[in-house]
Image: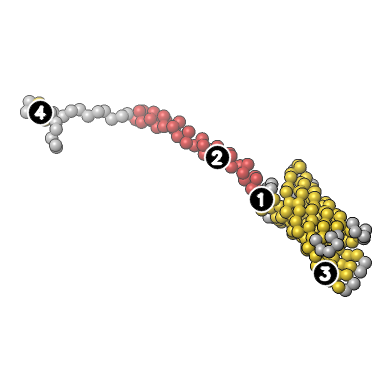
């Protein structure tokens, strides 16, 4: 239907078109649309503000592992003899606030005897403050003993308490103190009490 204009006196009458909006009206419409965009930008500003603490937390993220370098001493509850040596261990956290794994090796020396202790401890951590942590753990231990030129191996169990102290807010360096109790499953079931302590080094 192309010609739909009304006929007046035999001629097509044109219906007057609507007047175009004035420039003032267009300006009013554009200024009115500005507040409509504000609710869209407000959530973006809130997201940016909320992301700032997250960036700060990512900068202070936990280390990948913690290295323990120190010294250890042990005393047998069977014959009362003591032994001393260096202590080396590494800790990782597979489950935050629930599980830490520590693998370490400690050579202990005494007159005529050398004992290499290799252990794997499963620890439950507790955060006492920003600068102090406490852990309790148990796990297996492998004892390789060289006595008067003869070597022997034994499986043992170990229970330990671990106190960790960090002097700064960011945990880069600190020190630890770890008392432990060992129980050998071999013949004689020898038991011993030990303590180790030294430097903590965080590996980022």
Q: Residues within 10 Å of mark 1 (few under 14, many from 20)?
A: few
Q: Residue placed farthest to the front in the image?
A: 187
The quarter of the displayed image where residue 141 is located: bottom right
Identity of the residue drawn at 69% across and 50% down = 99
Question: In the visual, does 168 lie left or right of 113?
Answer: left
Q: Residue placed farthest to the bottom in the image?
A: 149
Q: Residues within 10 Å of mark 4 (few under 14, many from 20)?
A: few
In space, the residues marked 2 and 3 are separated at their CA atoms by 63 Å
Instruction: Identify the mark at residue 152; answer none if there is no mark.
Output: 3
Identity of the residue drawn at 80% across and 50% down = 161
User: Disc 2 vs disc 4: Cβ atoms closer than 8 Å?
Assistant: no
Residue nearest the observer in this picture, 58 or 191: 191
Instruction: Identify the mark at residue 7; answer none if there is no mark.
Output: 4
Question: In the visual, does 9 lie left or right of 78?
Answer: left
Question: In the picture shown, does residue 13 fall above or below 112?
Answer: above
Question: Label 1: which residue?
Answer: 95
The earlier-in-sequence mark between 2 and 3 is 2
Q: Identify the secondary structure beneath mark 1.
A: strand
User: Disc 1 vs disc 2: Cβ atoms closer than 8 Å?
Assistant: no
The earlier-in-sequence mark between 1 and 2 is 2
Instruction: Identify the mark at residue 25; answer none if there is no mark.
Output: none
Q: Nearer the viewer, mark 2 or mark 4?
A: 2
Q: Identify the secondary structure beneath mark 3.
A: strand
Residue nearest the observer in this picture, 47 or 4: 47
* Location of residue 3 in the rendering, given as x and y in whole percent from the top left corner: 13, 35
Q: Identify the secondary structure beneath mark 4.
A: strand
The earlier-in-sequence mark between 3 and 1 is 1
The quarter of the displayed image where residue 13 is located: top left
Q: Nearer the viewer, mark 1 or mark 2?
A: 1
């Amino acid at each position: 239907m192309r010609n739909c204009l009304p006929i007046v006196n035999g001629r097509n009458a044109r219906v007057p078109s609507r007047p175009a909006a004035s420039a003032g009206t267009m300006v009013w419409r554009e200024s009115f649309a500005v507040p409509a965009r504000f609710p869209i930008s407000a959530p973006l500003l809130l997201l940016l503000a909320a992301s700032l603490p997250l960036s700060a937390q990512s900068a202070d993220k936990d280390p990948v592992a913690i290295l323990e370098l120190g010294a250890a001493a042990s005393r047998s509850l069977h014959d009362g003899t003591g032994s001393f040596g260096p202590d080396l261990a590494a800790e990782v956290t597979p489950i935050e606030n629930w599980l830490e794994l520590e693998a370490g090796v400690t050579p202990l020396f005494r007159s005529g005897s050398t004992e290499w202790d290799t252990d794997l401890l499963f620890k439950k951590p507790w955060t006492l403050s920003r600068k102090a942590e406490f852990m309790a753990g148990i796990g297996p231990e492998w004892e390789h003993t060289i006595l008067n030129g003869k070597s022997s191996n034994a499986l043992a169990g170990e229970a330990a308490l671990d106190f960790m102290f960090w002097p700064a807010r960011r945990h880069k360096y600190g020190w630890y103190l770890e008392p432990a109790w060992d129980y050998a499953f071999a013949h004689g079931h020898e038991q011993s009490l030990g303590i180790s302590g030294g430097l903590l080094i965080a590996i980022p």
